[in-house]
Image (cartoon, grey):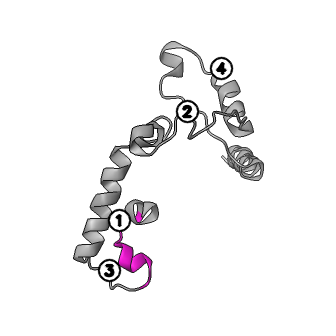
């Protein structure tokens, strides 16, 4: 259902059984999924029932762990170099594959020499 929601298609079409029109069942599934997503915490993605023993959950339903994403680390490090104030307004840090970055640098250099 997550992909159906993202792509805006009925579940029957995703399963290869529909022609793209929304059946009553497709609409009910989409509404149920939307309701389920609204119950999820936007930060951690869990739902209150998962923790509530009275609702069949378990207070130990999840274990918090750490994970280092090298890409996020590189972005955070580069973000420190963005100036404060007007010079930094609108500056975004993003990751580019090294080969793409090199091609862009080459294109800029070539462009400057042909002016």
Return the disc, 2 or 4, that comes first in the chain's sequence. Answer: 4
Which sits in the foreground, 55 or 66?
55
* Residue at which label 1 appears: 8
Q: CA distance from mark 2 to mark 4?
A: 11 Å
- Disc nearer the start of the sequence (1/2): 1
Q: Nearer the viewer, mark 4 or mark 1?
A: 1
103 to the left or right of 9:
right
Q: Earlier in the sequence, mark 3 or mark 2?
A: 3
Q: Which residue is mark 3?
A: 20
Above/below status of 40 relative to 19: above
Closer to the N terminus: mark 4 or mark 3? Answer: 3
Gap between marks 3 and 2, in whole Å? 38 Å
**Which region shows up in magenta?**
7-16
Label whose residue precedes the other's in the sequence (4 or 1): 1
Upstream in the sequence, badge 3 or badge 1? 1
The residue wearing badge 2 is 92
Task: Identify whether 27 is placed above or below 55.
Answer: below
Question: Which corner quadrant holds the N terminus?
Answer: bottom left
Q: Position of residue 81 (x, y in %)?
A: 66, 20
Spatial CA distance of label 4 from label 3 is: 47 Å
Mark 4 falls on what kind of element?
Answer: loop
Image position of 50 with respect to 92: above or below: below
Percent across and percent down for residue 62 are: 59, 39
Location of mark 4 (residue): 80
SS category of the residue bearing label 2? loop
């Amino acid at each position: 259902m997550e992909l159906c929601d993202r792509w805006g298609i009925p579940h029957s079409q995703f399963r290869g059984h529909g022609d793209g029109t929304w059946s009553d069942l497709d609409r009910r599934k989409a509404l149920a999924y939307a309701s389920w997503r609204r119950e999820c915490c936007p930060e951690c993605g869990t739902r209150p029932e998962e923790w509530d023993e009275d609702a069949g959950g378990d207070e130990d339903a999840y274990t918090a762990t750490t994970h280092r994403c090298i890409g996020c680390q590189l972005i955070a490090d580069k973000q420190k170099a963005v100036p404060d104030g007007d010079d930094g307004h609108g500056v975004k840090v993003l990751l580019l594959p090294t080969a793409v970055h090199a091609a862009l640098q080459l294109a800029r250099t070539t462009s400057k020499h042909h002016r």
